[in-house]
Image (cartoon, rainbow, N blue to C red):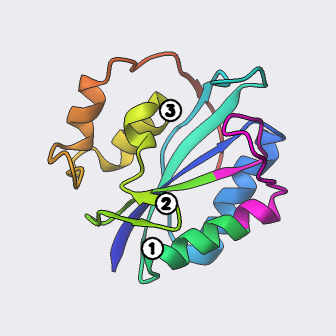
Amino acid sequence: MARVYVSIGSNIDKEDNIPSSVGALQERFGYLDISNVYETKAIGFEGDDFHNLVVGFDTDYSPKEVSLILKQIEADHGRTRGKKKFESRTLDLDQLLYGDLVMQMDGVNLPHPDIFLYNFVLKPLAELAGDVLHPEEEQTIDVLWEASVENGGMKFVEYAF
């Protein structure tokens, strides 16, 4: 059984899509550890603010199976994939860590490179997996968060899951 961490983000109907996606993940994977939710400005384009969080769960599914389930949940929430990397979206689910696995499959890298790129990924991941060693960096997620140059700019948002 592997411990998996998934980031969740939305800036379209986020007050509905965030709780609904958490429910869909619970239906597929069972019990979830859930971080706080943070609001951040859209990056790379003009758009509504995003709400972001991370969930953790244990699974016997393979990384590819997890990825396919995440894509289906995104599609069920109206996610369309455009040609632009930075655009508004109903739901964005990214597999961040799958145990200590390091791999690339179908354009998905594990661990996910966004862990280092965005504070809205690293901060909630640190809340749930602070003592976990990053499989490539061999430092804990907490240490990576503390060393992050951009560890601000987020606003806590209250959700009831």
Residue 30 appearing in the image:
no
Q: Does the magenta stretch include residue 83?
A: yes
Disc 2: which residue = 108
**How busy is the neighbourhood of tag 3: few (under 14 within 10 Å), some, or many (20 plus)?**
many
Element class at badge 2: strand
How far apart are the alpha carbons under marks 2 and 1?
Answer: 10 Å
Element class at badge 3: helix
Q: Which of 117 and 9 is in front in this view?
A: 117
Residue located at (51% from left, 16% from top): 153
Disc 3: which residue = 120
Extreme residue toward the bottom, this view:
60
| Residue 18 at x, y percent in the picture | 70, 48
Type of amino acid under label 2: Val
- The reply to whether the C-beta atoms of the residues labelled 2 and 1 are less than 8 Å apart is yes
Type of amino acid under label 1: Pro
Which mark is nearer the camera, 1 or 3? 1
Query: Mark 1 or mark 3, which has the lower sequence index?
Result: 1
Residue located at (45% from left, 29% from top): 119
Residue located at (20% from left, 51% from top): 133
Residue 59 appearing in the image:
yes
Q: Give the range drawn in magenta.
A: 73-92
How far apart are the alpha carbons under marks 3 and 2?
Answer: 19 Å
Query: Mark 2 or mark 1, which has the lower sequence index?
Result: 1
**How busy is the neighbourhood of tag 2: few (under 14 within 10 Å), some, or many (20 plus)?**
some
Q: Nearer the viewer, residue 51 or 159?
A: 51
Element class at badge 1: helix
How far apart are the alpha carbons under marks 1 and 3?
Answer: 23 Å
Residue located at (78% from left, 47% from top): 82
